[in-house]
Image (cartoon, rainbow, N blue to C red):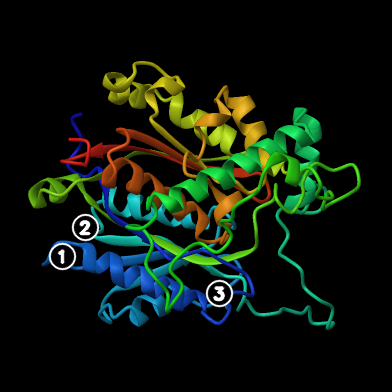
Amino acid sequence: MDLDPRTPVIVAARRTPIGTAGHSLKDVTADALAAVAIETVVADLPDGLTVDEVVLGNCLGPGGNLARVAALRAGLPDETAARTVDLQCGSGLAAVVAAVDAIQAGRCDVVIAGGAESASTAPTRLWPSGAAYSRAPFAPAGHADPDMGPAADDLARHAGISRERSDRYAARSFSRARTAVQEGRFDEEIVPVGQVRRDERVRDGMTPERLARLRPTFGADGVVTAATATGISDGAAVVAVIPEELRARLGVPGLAVVATSQRGCDPALPGLGPVPAVRALLDGPSIISQLRGYGGGADWGMIDRVEINEAFAPQVLACCDALGLDEQRVCPDGGGLALGHPWGASGAVLLVRLFSALVRQGLGRTGLAAIAVGGGQGVAALVVTVGETAAS
């Protein structure tokens, strides 16, 4: 594939273990989690590179510029620029998109980007009246503004996703993640935090029969349960992005980010956000021409690896149905249902997973990452391997 010299390429990718809120990482702040990942990714880079900027996504942290705090905590020089973005669950992927834009524009040559979330240490907020503050609005008055859990149940009813199918999907995610752990597929991407070295939520015995016994979480007639909804989590994930001309000169492998998109959908059904975002990627004529050698045409045959954030089983299934995507192809090593969902980091976790599968393990050439956002949006990215990967 002929790439423009300024095509952004991910050349390093790491994440922390994902902990269940209130458990293994309960005392580690979001900036500390991010710093661990940043420090390791910087160490992964070839000698002589200088980080121009750090961009991090975060949802519910302490405020301020988390990226700046994490960059300094990771030992980067005072001169390193840093900014924090908030696109709710899409924040981590949006941060990488911001890095991609900076590389393409020629403003930066080395950007560290990703996200971090510590639900365990997020501050409790109050309104001036003293009333408890739950969350910011995802949409203004006059628009639907559901919480994501009830919205997932609404989407299940809207899309005809059954409880049984949701349970089967979740059971498969847990089984795949457990197998991936046993086979060491997460080992190279995970950076230990203290004594924590593995994702906490992954477990055995999550069969469809066992999941069928769980009660609905958001209403007696709902589909979503504690197993078909991802856990509230702590974790961080970051990648290093450089231009193709620099990657080629260094002779390192990577993932070229050939397209990104952000699109909106009905705020009443926010879980469908990945659908318009993914369609925008696959329908672009320039992208089809770039990928023609890998499958020819805007269909799923040209994508080797698909990572869609598993916030809720019926939500992912509804997206698969709308996109004509075989659900078996999503998250081959398990996704957010089994691993957890550290909101501000999850979009970057998807790219770390693609880097491990496509570059480290050589399990294909092309990949797609997508995530839904509260308020009815989706973010997606399309990547292609470059350089001498494990499969080369």
Name the residue at 68% across, 49% down.
Answer: 375
Percent across and percent down for residue 313 are 67, 41
Circles 2 and 3: CB distance less than 8 Å?
no
Q: Is residue 25 left or right of residue 137?
A: left
Q: CA distance from mark 2 to mark 1?
A: 9 Å
Q: Amino acid at mark 3?
A: Ser
Q: Quick one: which residue is furthest to the top in this view?
A: 296
Q: CA distance from mark 1 to mark 3?
A: 34 Å
Q: Can residue 80 be seen at all in this image of the molecule?
A: yes
Q: Quick one: which residue is furthest to the right in this view?
A: 220
Q: Amino acid at mark 1?
A: Leu
Q: Residues within 10 Å of mark 3 (few under 14, many from 20)?
A: many
Secondary structure category for the residue under label 2 = loop
Q: Which one is earlier in the sequence, the residue at label 1 or at label 3? A: 3
Percent across and percent down for residue 217 are 82, 53
Circles 2 and 1: CB distance less than 8 Å?
yes
Q: Which one is earlier in the sequence, the residue at label 2 or at label 1? A: 1
Residue of label 1: 49
Name the residue at 12% across, 45% down.
Answer: 248
Residue of label 2: 109
Q: Is residue 170 left or right of residue 251?
A: right
